[in-house]
């Protein structure tokens, strides 16, 4: 079961990555960053909060944001309250990219995951994922 899970995870992410690349020139990590940013009221978030939201190391976020800045998907802003802190902000180019990518991504996730399961299985799987995540959260304490 564990090997099946690992294989499914790798195949699913690779397939979604290929489709995001084809639809909008985005990678899965690009898409994840843009989703977090579009979920905020101001379209911006502190780097440390972005790292926590994505479950990434701060250095990974920083390196990825630099790559996204070069493509003008995001910009980095200083934090007026903290000279060492920074915000990541979605740009108009980033908004356009996620607007192009989201419909295809939703269709792909539906096709690859939800269409293969019954409504009861979706609920069961959600409950299983929540139970596993709560064990991980508790082990981090």
Image (cartoon, rainbow, N blue to C red):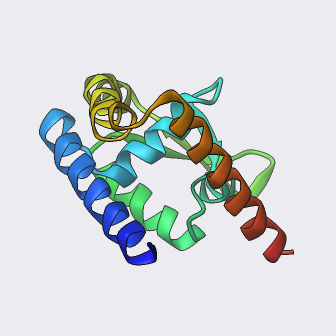
Q: Is residue 77 left or right of residue 7?
A: right
Residue visible at 37% across and 62% down in the picture = 9
Quarter of the view holding residue 85: bottom right
Q: Which of 29/42 is in front?
A: 29
Q: Quadrant of the N terminus?
A: bottom left
Residue 37 falls in image quadrant = top right
Name the residue: 81% across, 47% down: 81
Describe residue 119's horizontal placement relative to residue 111 as left or right: right
Q: Is residue 55 above or below residue 39?
A: below
Q: Position of residue 49 (x, y in %)?
A: 68, 52
Residue 53 visible in the picture? yes
Above or below 101: residue 129: below
x and y percent of residue 14 in the render?
Answer: 24, 58
The residue located at (35%, 28%) in the rendering is: 106
**Vertical side of 37 occupied by 130: above or below:** below
Q: Visible in this render: residue 84? A: no
* Relative image position of residue 116 (x, y in whole percent): 33, 37
Q: Residue furthest right?
A: 141
What residue do we see at 52% from left, 39% from top?
Answer: 121
Q: How many marks?
A: 0
Q: Pick whichever, 5 or 28, lies toward us.
A: 5
Q: Kindly give the residue lying farthest to the left in the view shown.
A: 22
Q: Please indicate whether residue 17 sits to the left or right of residue 5 in the image.
A: left
Q: Is residue 138 above or below residue 81?
A: below
Q: In front: 77, or 74? A: 74
Q: Quadrant of the C terminus?
A: bottom right
């Amino acid at each position: 079961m564990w090997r099946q899970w690992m294989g499914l995870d790798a195949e699913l992410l690779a397939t979604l990555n290929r489709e995001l690349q084809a639809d909008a020139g985005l990678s899965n990590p690009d898409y994840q960053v843009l989703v977090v940013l579009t979920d905020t009221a101001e379209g911006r978030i502190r780097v440390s909060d972005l790292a926590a939201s994505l479950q990434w190391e701060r250095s990974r976020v920083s390196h990825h944001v630099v790559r996204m800045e070069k493509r003008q998907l995001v910009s980095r802003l200083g934090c007026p309250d903290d000279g060492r802190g920074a915000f990541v902000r979605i740009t108009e180019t980033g908004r356009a990219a996620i607007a192009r990518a989201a419909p295809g991504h939703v269709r792909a996730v539906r096709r690859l995951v939800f269409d293969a399961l019954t409504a009861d299985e979706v609920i069961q799987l959600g409950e299983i994922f929540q139970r596993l995540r709560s064990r991980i959260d508790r082990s981090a304490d």
